[in-house]
Amino acid sequence: MSARAWFRGRRMLLGAAAFLAAGQLGLPAAFAQDARSSAAQKAAREWLAFTDDRNATAAWNAAGAKFRNTLPAQRWMQTLQAQRAPFGPLVQRTVVATQFTKARPGQPPGDYAVLLFRTAFAKKTGANETVTLEREPDGVWRVVGYVIN
């Protein structure tokens, strides 16, 4: 091994060690997710867990006011059953994107998060789920829209 190659290898090791040390010192990691994204994703996943269990009542109760005011509980139960039953149980769900906006078509201004999930079910492996949340006046993110295709 040449001296140049040996030094190059040491430089890469030192760079990795410095990166790890920065994390131990409490410095922000280069790929850390912001708290707002984490909170919105957590709320979406908790709500989706109800839909995965086909617990339409719990999903409806946990949804935001706009969702509940637009879609009566009985209609939501029928919709969830019709849309999710053919796909079978959840296999895997991955967040693809999280986008924040102050405006949604046909909605008043607000604090919205739109999350796109790539989802695999037992009978449909290539599904996309879009979950729209609104941060309501109490500061909690709640689902106000759900589309699966």
Image (spheres, rainbow, N blue to C red):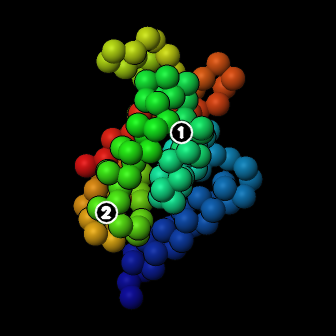
Labels in figure, total: 2
Residue extending farthest bottom? 1
| The residue positioned farthest toward the top in the image shown | 108
Question: What secondary structure is marked by label 2?
Answer: helix
Identify the amino acid type marked 2. Answer: Phe
Tell me the kind of residue under disc 1. Trp
Residue closest to the eye, 19 or 36:
36
Q: Residue at x 54, y 71 (%)?
A: 13
Residue hosting label 1 = 60
The numbered disc on residue 87 is 2
Q: Is residue 137 above or below residue 123?
A: above
Q: Position of residue 125 (x, y in %)?
A: 27, 66
**Residue toward you, 75 or 80:** 75
Asked if 97 appears above or below 123 in the picture, the reply is above
Graded by Cα atoms within 10 Å as few (under 14), some (14 to 19) or many (20 or more), the crowding at tag 2 reads: some
Secondary-structure class at tag 1: helix
Distance from Cα at disc 1 to Cα at disc 2: 20 Å
* Residue 59 at x, y percent in the picture: 54, 44
Which quadrant of the figure has residue 92? bottom left
